């Protein structure tokens, strides 16, 4: 109605102006004895006045319309993602809050689907950001085609999307939507002239009328289920009670991590690395442990993932680096043989991406007085592959005289793609999974043979991780692996357990009943994994 009045206003002004002019001319003609020329001048002036009024009304009309359109566009931009046109995160939470209230009022089921594209980074990096943006737009269209008009599809951020399906009768209806999306994603995407199959992992959180979870809790739970789906490669996973307990435990760990760092609850244990050919100790790997006030001594599998996600990994990594350097320096003072020992310290992704990390390493060496050649930094292969820009940081560290090792070698995305960068690497560490699978298949044996051959060609050292029995020791030795670590030799132990006078001295380690094997520690257990 308002728009119709605005559209009519210039005509009304013009018509009213002309009518007023005509009346004024008639009055002037009757009351005043004016000549025809004077009347004509009066009429012309009135017409121009009417036209001026109409023009002003037209301008005002256009300005009001333009302002109204700009206001609508501004409101739209504030509520929607600029790239895909989907509703953005704040709008999604507002819609979810309203949907939860309606679900409880109308006794209906509500579903929250959290989606993350698989291998999006590979496509984005290999084909360019324009291709990545185009893929996100295509994905947005596909998601919208899988839901009803009353449902909400939003871009949560990056390659993550959240879908709200509401006013449903059963849990099965929510799962049916997830299956429909997966089916749609199985169709190839035409991207810059090539066909790409882009899959997704979906986490599902289902809210029933009696559910007391807040909107942000539902999104968090769907996110947790999505990671479960990604780990299991199952396409989708539904959040359940077990996962809820895991979330509660994770939140407890996150809270306690801050306190643990402030109160210095973290300690470093050391696992020997043995030169099996020379029958002597080669070095140690420094492994962090947490002396939790209520849980006792807990291993890194319990807390490192949380530390990485919450940005606390750099602090823990620096703590281990400084403690390991200091301990190695202490051993140097206690035994001349200790100066031949290498101290290996793991480097987290966050540390590699920190431009100040080389300075942190240099400061730790200077503070402890440790010879740089005794320090070896281990970087997981996947971290190097995902962050090739971090190679400049590694070169700066290598220039200090510090050794570099690639951890979990052979498990990465493209192990051969950065062979040319091995000029700064001194050691390859064979992942424990290959050692475990030697007995069950020839594939792992072939991989180990290939790694050893590559290492010899590039003059690199090879260390096998997770050696737990004499059969593995014998087979690895036959394959040309001379450096090993694992529970066969010793579990990770506290520094005060290690006697530098007996541990570091060159000595024969043969067992009387088996001259091909090394003497295992009397105090070790044999758990399933390293660290």
Image (cartoon, rainbow, N blue to C red):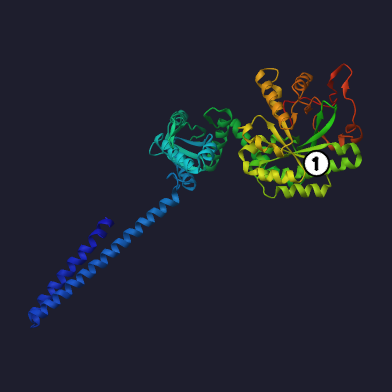
Give the residue at x 70% y 20%. Answer: 438
Count of numbered tags: 1
Residue 104 in view here: no
Is 282 displayed left or right of 396 in the figure? Answer: right
Instruction: Estimate the x, y position of residue 504 in percent, counting from the top left.
Output: 88, 33
**Residue closest to the far front:** 457
Residue 272, quarter of the rendered image? top right
Residue 446, quarter of the rendered image? top right
- Nearest the viewer among 222 and 55 is 55
Local crowd size for mark 1, using a 10 Å CA cut-off: few (<14), some (14–19), many (≥20): some
Is 253 displayed left or right of 142 in the figure? Answer: right
Instruction: Estimate the x, y position of residue 395 in percent, counting from the top left.
Output: 70, 44
Residue 375 sits above or below residue 12 on the image? above
**Residue closest to the far top:** 513
Q: Which residue is mark 1?
A: 373
Is 161 displayed left or right of 34 in the figure? Answer: right
Residue 192, quarter of the rendered image? top left
- Nearest the viewer among 245 and 380 is 380
Element class at badge 1: helix
Which of the image's four quarters has the C terminus? top right
Instruction: Estimate the x, y position of residue 127 in percent, counting from the top left.
Output: 50, 39
Give the residue at x 28% y 57%. Answer: 2
Residue 81 sits above or below residue 274 on the image? below
Which of the image's four quarters has the N terminus? bottom left
- Nearest the viewer among 323 and 342 is 342
Residue 409 in view here: yes
Is 371 displayed left or right of 78 in the figure? Answer: right
Instruction: Estimate the x, y position of residue 485 in percent, counting from the top left.
Output: 78, 29
């Amino acid at each position: 109605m308002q728009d119709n009045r605005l559209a009519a206003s210039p005509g009304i002004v013009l018509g009213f102006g002309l009518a007023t002019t005509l009346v004024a001319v008639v009055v002037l003609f009757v009351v005043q004895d004016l000549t025809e020329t004077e009347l004509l001048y009066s009429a012309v002036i009135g017409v121009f006045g009417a036209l001026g009024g109409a023009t002003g009304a037209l301008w005002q009309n256009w300005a009001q319309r333009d302002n109204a359109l700009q206001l609508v566009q501004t409101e739209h931009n504030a509520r929607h993602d600029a790239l895909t046109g989907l509703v953005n995160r704040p709008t999604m939470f507002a819609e979810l809050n309203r949907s939860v209230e309606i679900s409880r009022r109308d006794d209906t089921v509500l579903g929250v689907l959290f989606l993350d594209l698989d291998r999006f980074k590979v496509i984005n990096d290999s084909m360019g950001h324009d291709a990545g943006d185009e893929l996100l737009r295509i994905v947005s269209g596909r998601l919208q085609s899988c839901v009803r008009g009353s449902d909400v599809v939003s871009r949560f951020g990056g390659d993550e999307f959240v879908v709200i399906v509401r006013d449903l009768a059963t849990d099965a209806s929510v799962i049916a939507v997830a299956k429909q999306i997966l089916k749609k994603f199985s169709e190839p995407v035409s991207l810059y002239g090539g066909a790409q199959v882009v899959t997704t992992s979906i986490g599902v959180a289902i809210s029933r009328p009696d559910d007391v979870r807040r909107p942000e809790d539902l999104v968090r739970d769907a996110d947790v289920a999505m990671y479960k789906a990604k780990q299991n490669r199952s396409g989708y996973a539904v959040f359940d009670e077990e996962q809820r307990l895991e979330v509660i435990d994770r939140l407890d760990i996150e809270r306690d991590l801050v306190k643990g760092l402030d109160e210095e609850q973290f300690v470093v244990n050391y696992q020997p690395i043995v030169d099996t050919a020379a029958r002597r100790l080669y070095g140690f790997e420094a492994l962090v442990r947490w002396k939790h006030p209520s849980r006792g001594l807990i291993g890194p599998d319990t807390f490192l993932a949380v530390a990485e996600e919450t940005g606390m990994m750099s602090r823990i990594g620096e703590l281990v680096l400084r403690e390991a350097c200091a301990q190695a320096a202490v051993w140097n003072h206690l035994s001349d043989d200790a100066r031949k020992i290498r101290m290996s310290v793991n480097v987290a992704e966050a540390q590699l991406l920190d431009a100040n990390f080389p300075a942190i390493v240099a400061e730790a060496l200077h503070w402890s007085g440790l010879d740089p050649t005794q320090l070896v930094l281990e970087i997981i292969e996947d971290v190097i592959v995902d962050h090739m820009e971090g190679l400049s940081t590694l070169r700066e560290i290598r220039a200090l005289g510090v050794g570099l090792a690639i951890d979990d070698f052979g498990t990465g995305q493209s192990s051969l793609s950065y062979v040319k960068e091995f000029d700064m690497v001194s050691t390859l560490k064979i992942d424990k999974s290959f050692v475990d699978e030697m007995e069950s298949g020839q594939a792992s044996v072939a991989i180990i043979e290939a790694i050893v051959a590559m290492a010899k060609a590039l003059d690199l050292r090879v260390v096998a991780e997770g050696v737990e029995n004499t059969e593995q020791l014998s087979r690895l030795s036959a394959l040309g692996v001379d450096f090993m670590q694992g529970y066969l030799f010793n579990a990770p132990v506290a520094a005060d357990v290690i006697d530098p006078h007996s541990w570091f001295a060159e000595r024969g380690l043969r067992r009387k009943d088996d001259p091909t094997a090394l003497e295992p520690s009397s105090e070790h257990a044999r758990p399933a994994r390293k660290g």
